[in-house]
Amino acid sequence: DVAAAGNAGCTESARRERESLVYQHIAKYAKPDDWTACWVTAQTLIIYWGLFWAACAYRGPLERLVCGTLIVVCGLTRTRVFCLMHDMAHQSFWSSRAANVVGATLLGSMVYTPYSGWKHGHDYHHRHSNNTDRKQNAQTAPLTVRQYEAMPLWRRAAYCAVYGHWSLLTTTPFFYFVVVQRFLSTWYENLLILLYWGCVFGSGSTRLVTVDLLSAAVGASMGFFLFHIQHTFEGAYKASSKDYSRFDNGMWGSSNLLVPPWLAFFTASIQYHNVHHLNTRVPLYRLRQCFEDGGALFEGVPTFTMTDALMRLPYSLRNDEDLSFTSCYDVFAKGDPTAEGRACGVGGS
């Protein structure tokens, strides 16, 4: 239990004092800086569109290798665009509410994500993540093993097709962003997507379509990978509504991912997820400084390397009793527990 380990040896008064100090520290960074926001936005868009058009236009030696590399880097930059949109949806990126709404709407159209639908679902996630009395549909292990075993065979198979680790970073991200999000969008958000698609598909350029779809797939997969490790790890804080603490969830139910320097630009500091859950008003361009300046205040928070994160990809079902995770493939392979119960004469007439 990560939360128990983090609070080990602490009296209730000491725990409350730490909570107060953590929130006081974070509050100092929960202020947007419009000049920094302008610079971050400008560099992100210049790099993204530069890579996009370079991948579309390049004709020369090793064309497939060069274009493939450009598409991958463009896709990773698309993840960064999503992180900016995510911050604007939290009203933390710009000091102006209107600028955040307009920016999130426009950037959202670049990453196939509606600001309106995203904000609604994501606000729910921040209020109730790891609350065992609430649905966890916004997480990558939304069901417990018991809930999964209670479902009919076809629903268990469908769950594997969505949350199993072979699809979690391949088909699921692309389908979610490109298809599912269209049903969560307002008419004007879908209109922006249609206008964008009209330019891409209407160009008649196969290369343009290929670059857009493949970079979207890379960006979506990277986003799902980052989101998966943010809350899906053994010992992550879990509590019922009666005992739920947003502080404990931020400290022990949200992770800190150690990202290599070459990848840090693309993740835009979202790897400091414990800070983000403690105060969503800290803009992404201040998350790293907030965490590093906090020092001992963040001692003991769940911290993982990229290798650690990859090893936890199979986690798709929860055991809330012992705070462990397992693979839905493993549970599915065991067969239908309800059928076994009927064979033994259990479960009514």
Image: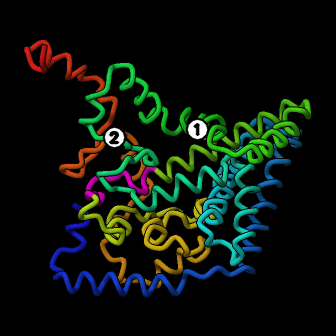
**Residue 68 image offset from top left, x and y in percent:** 72, 40
Which residue is located at x 24 percent, y 64 percent? 243
Residue drawn at x 9%, y 19% as measured from the top left? 346
Residue 110 locus on image (x, y percent): 74, 50
Residue 260 drawn at (x, y percent): 52, 62
Q: Which mark is residue 143?
A: 2
Q: Secondary structure at mark 1?
A: helix
Q: Reading the chain from its start, which is encountered first: label 1 or label 2?
A: 2
**In this rendering, position of residue 246 left or right of residue 181:** left
Q: Number of labelled discs?
A: 2
Residue span colored magenta: 228-240
- Tell me the quarter of the image containing the C terminus: top left
**Residue 329 percent across, percent down from the top left:** 34, 29
Residue 148: mark in rendering: none
* Location of residue 249 with respect to 56 vertically, above or below: below
Q: Residue at x 56, y 67 (%)?
A: 269
For the residue pair 290 and 99, the one nearer the viewer reads as 99
Looking at the image, residue 314 sits to the left or right of residue 147; the answer is: right
Residue tagged 1: 176
Is 234 within the magenta?
A: yes
Q: Viewer-proximal residue, 319 or 222?
A: 319
